Amino acid sequence: IAEITRVKRKQITMNSFFGQKEEKPAGPDPLFAATTEMEMYTHLFNNMAAACFEKCSSRKHKEPDLALGEMSCSDRCVSKYLEAQEKVGVVLQKANEAQALQQKNLAEMQNALGGR
């Protein structure tokens, strides 16, 4: 999602008051992108917290603080969870890039065939 906000395409539009051309970003709405990214990170954090708490916390809860074993388990769990999410993100990014390239090639082929 962060990559979407980095898109720097521009589209030329006419200013209705003065007839001058002005550039407007043609990419996604930055507020929508930021909101979507925040929702994604909130979902990631909640899932990670639930999974690591389930795996690492003691069921007795006799002490207000985590024990040493619970702390190290939580650290490893969070590290592995984030590493897995990063790997999934890389795979999805490559798939999206391949799909975009395929769509671009298809559009070029359609334009070439339509131009005859």
Image (cartoon, rainbow, N blue to C red):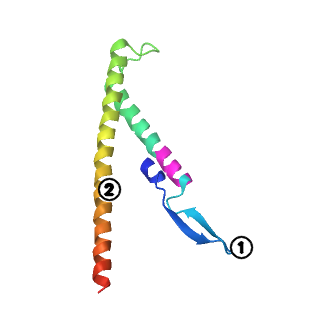
| Magenta segment includes 26 | no
**Residue 114 in the image: x percent, y percent?**
31, 84
In the image, what residue occupies the spot 53% across and 67% down?
11
Residue located at (52% from left, 48% from top): 34
Q: For the stretch drawn in magenta, what is the main secondary structure?
A: helix
Q: Is residue 32 magenta?
A: yes
Q: How crowded is mark 2: few (under 14 residues within 10 Å), some or many (20 or more)?
A: few
N-terminal-most mark, 1 or 2: 1
* Residue 60 image offset from top left, x and y in percent: 37, 17
How many other residues sit within 10 Å of disc 1, few (<14), some (14-19) or many (≥20)?
Answer: few
Task: Give residue 72's position: percent from left, percent from top.
Answer: 34, 18
Asked if residue 1 can be seen in this view, the reply is no
For residue 87, say whether it is visible. Answer: yes
Q: In this view, does 86 lie to the left or right of 27?
A: left
Image quarter for residue 17? bottom right
In the picture of the structure, the residue carrying the numbered disc 2 is 96
Disc 1 or disc 2, which is closer to the eye?
1
Q: What residue type is labelled 2?
A: Asn
- Between 108 and 33, the one lying in front of the other is 108
Q: What element carries label 2?
A: helix
Q: Quadrant of residue 47?
A: top left
Q: Which residue lies furthest to the right in this view?
A: 17
Rendering coords of residue 42 (x, y %): 47, 40
Query: Residue 92: which numbered mark, if any?
Result: none
Residue at far bottom of view: 116
Quadrant location, the C terminus? bottom left
Magenta residue span: 31-39
Q: What residue type is labelled 1?
A: Phe
Q: Is residue 111 above or below residue 101?
A: below
> Where 41 falls versus 100 (above or below)?
above
- State if disc 2 and disc 1 touch (CB < 8 Å): no
Q: Residue 18 bears which disc, if any?
A: 1
